[in-house]
Every structure is written in C-alpha cells, then in structure tokens.
Amino acid sequence: MNKKLKTEAVDHLFDAILTLETREECYAFFEDVCTINELMSLSQRYEVARMLREKRTYLEIAEITGASTATISRVNRSLNYGSDGYDMVLQRVAGKPENPVA
C-alpha cells in the first residue's frame, strides 16, 4: 500500500464508501463526490482492466472505451505491478474465489 495514500481523510472516505448498499446509493454518493469527468475516468479505467484481463488487444480496448494507449498502458502496469486491487475486485464481481497473494 502506498504510504502517501494512507491518511485519516482517505480512511474516512473509504469507510463512507463501505456503507453504500445499492447501486443507486453509489450513484447518489459518487455524483456528489466526483465530477462527471472524474467518475467517467474511473469507470473507463475499470473497463480497461476488465478487458485486459479478457486478453483484448490495446486496439480493441481503445476503440470500445475511447481510452488512450497511455491510459491502457498505465492500467496494464497496475495489473502487472500494482497492489492487486483490480484483480481482487474483478474476481469478486465474477464470483470467483480470490487467489491469495503470497
């Protein structure tokens, strides 16, 4: 975990997010917290990660999501060298058991 990220304020934000129970609650909260562009960027990165794990090509991903190759590359770097957050969530959404990281 990035030590610069771990602050009391970020803990409070994550605690607030963890209270959300429905998609509609998520829409209401995130519409208040994020700008439309910020939310669209977050959702685009998530879609890029999902498609990379489906072994889609950069060209396919760029055409479907509108993401730049720089964004796709950055997400790919996170998938390969990051904190495994994308994979944890993608596995949960897919209903697959998580693979513990050694």
Image (tube, helix red, strand yellow):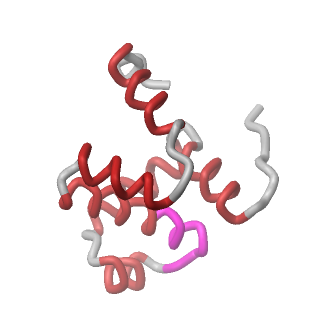
Q: Which residues are magenta?
A: 49-56
Residue 11 to residue 91: above or below: above
Residue located at (52% from left, 37% from top): 19
Q: On the rendered image, what quadrant is the C terminus found in?
A: top right
- Reply yes or no: does residue 53 show up in magenta: yes
Residue located at (53% from left, 37% from top): 18
Task: Report the side of 36 relative to 50 (left or right).
Answer: left
In the image, 3 versus 27, the foreground residue is 27
Residue located at (41% from left, 19% from top): 6
Residue 83 to residue 91: above or below: above
- Reply yes or no: does residue 17 show up in magenta: no
* Magenta segment main secondary structure: helix
Residue 83 lies, in percent from the top left, at: 54, 37
Determine which quarter of the picture holds residue 41: bottom left
Residue 20 to residue 59: above or below: above
Residue 31 lies, in percent from the top left, at: 27, 54
Residue 49 lies, in percent from the top left, at: 49, 62
Q: How many marks?
A: 0
In the image, 98 versus 55, the foreground residue is 98
Task: Report the side of 52 relative to 70 (left or right).
Answer: right
In the image, 74 versus 45, the foreground residue is 45
Task: Report the side of 9 relative to 16 (left or right).
Answer: left
Residue 72 to residue 10: above or below: below
Determine which quarter of the picture holds residue 54: bottom right
Residue located at (69% from left, 55% from top): 92
Which residue is the extreme one toward the top?
Answer: 8
